[in-house]
């Protein structure tokens, strides 16, 4: 069973506009959530995280929102830049256990 | 370069052959993870070590898969009698757990192609 789902396999956005990537989870024990970014032929790199005691975390152009009641989180990138084009993975963990990843969303930012 | 290093970057093998991949974690990281990623999917957890102890191995895909971290530093992942379904990217990651907030640092992976 997929405990972490990213229902949009791809997203295309114009440069300068907002990109919103979504993630849903089913395991209510998850208490720590992360977003990773992956370029072709490279490993995933950490982008931003959020603990379940918060509902928002911001780092520059990147903001993650967590809605625990809906078991939903989203990553906002504003303004989007062509260099943001990559595959974005949502991941979650509980009590320090291993990360469970979603299937990824390919973001394409058009100049 | 002080990141996670994986070798080789690419491995092409014939079905039935054994393959071994190596991972060198970030030096001060005591946890080391192996993940597998197939096309269009997210990384799938396989196993992890804390120092030299393998704390979770139930997710290894079959008894053909095994991993070691003999001195608590580098790790190897071996696949015996490879099958075409083993073709995937094998990712290694390392971390230093700080309470509940664990952030993994990934290597660039080993791309395995089984012909």
Image: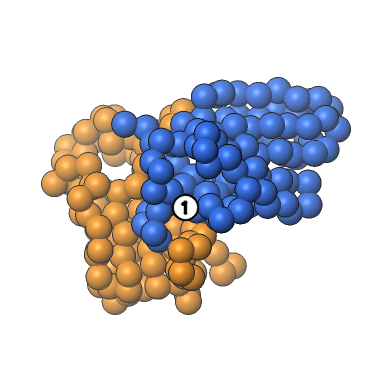
Chain colours: A blue, B orange
Subunit under mark 1 = A
On screen, residue A49 above or below A18: below
View extreme (left): residue = B63
Nearest the eye: A90 or B65: A90
Above or below — where is B53 with respect to A29?
below
**Secondary structure state at the residue bearing disc 1:** loop
In x, y percent, where is residue A14?
81, 25
Q: Quadrant of the N terminus of chain B?
A: bottom right
Camera-nearest residue between A66 and A108: A66
Task: Residue A65: name its quadrant.
Answer: top right
Residue B63 point in image, percent of width and height: 13, 46
Q: Nearer the viewer, residue B36 or A58?
A: A58
> Who's the residue at 24% across and 47% down the image?
B59
Q: Which residue is drawn at 41% across and 36% down?
A: A26
Residue B50 in view (yes/no): yes
Q: In the rendered view of the protein, which quadrant contains the C terminus of chain B?
A: top left
* Among the 4 quarters of the image, the one containing residue B33: bottom left
Compared across the picture, whether B107 is left or right of B63 comes to: right
Please, is residue A92 above or below residue B93 in the view?
above
Compared across the picture, whether A79 is left or right of A101 comes to right
Q: Which residue is drawn at 22% across and 54% down?
A: B57
Residue A82 position within the rendered picture, expressed as x and y whole percent measured from the top left: 78, 35
Point out residue B17 in the picture as x, y percentages from the top left corner: 20, 42
Bin the neighbour count of mark 1 within 10 Å (Cα to Cα): few under 14, some 14-19, many 20 and up: some
Q: What residue does disc 1 label?
A: A31
């Amino acid at each position: 069973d997929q405990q972490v789902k990213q229902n949009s396999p791809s997203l295309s956005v114009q440069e300068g506009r907002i990109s919103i990537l979504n993630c849903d989870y089913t395991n209510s024990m998850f208490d720590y959530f992360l977003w990773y970014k992956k370029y072709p032929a490279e490993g995933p790199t950490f982008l931003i995280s959020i603990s379940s005691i918060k509902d928002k975390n911001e780092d520059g152009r990147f903001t993650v929102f967590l809605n625990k009641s809906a078991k939903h989180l989203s990553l906002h990138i504003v303004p989007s830049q062509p260099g943001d084009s990559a595959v974005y993975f949502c991941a979650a963990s509980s009590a320090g256990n291993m990360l469970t990843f979603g299937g990824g969303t390919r973001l394409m930012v058009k100049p | 370069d002080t990141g996670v290093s994986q070798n080789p970057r690419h491995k092409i093998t014939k079905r039935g052959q054994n393959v071994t991949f190596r991972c060198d974690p970030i030096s001060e990281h005591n946890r080391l993870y192996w993940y597998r990623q197939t096309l269009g999917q997210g990384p799938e957890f396989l196993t992890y070590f804390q120092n030299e102890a393998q704390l979770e191995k139930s997710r290894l895909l079959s008894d053909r898969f095994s991993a070691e971290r003999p001195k608590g530093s580098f790790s190897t992942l071996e696949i015996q009698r490879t099958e075409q379904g083993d073709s995937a990217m094998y990712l290694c990651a390392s971390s230093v757990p700080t309470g509940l907030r664990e952030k993994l640092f990934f290597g660039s992976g080993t791309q395995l192609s089984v012909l």
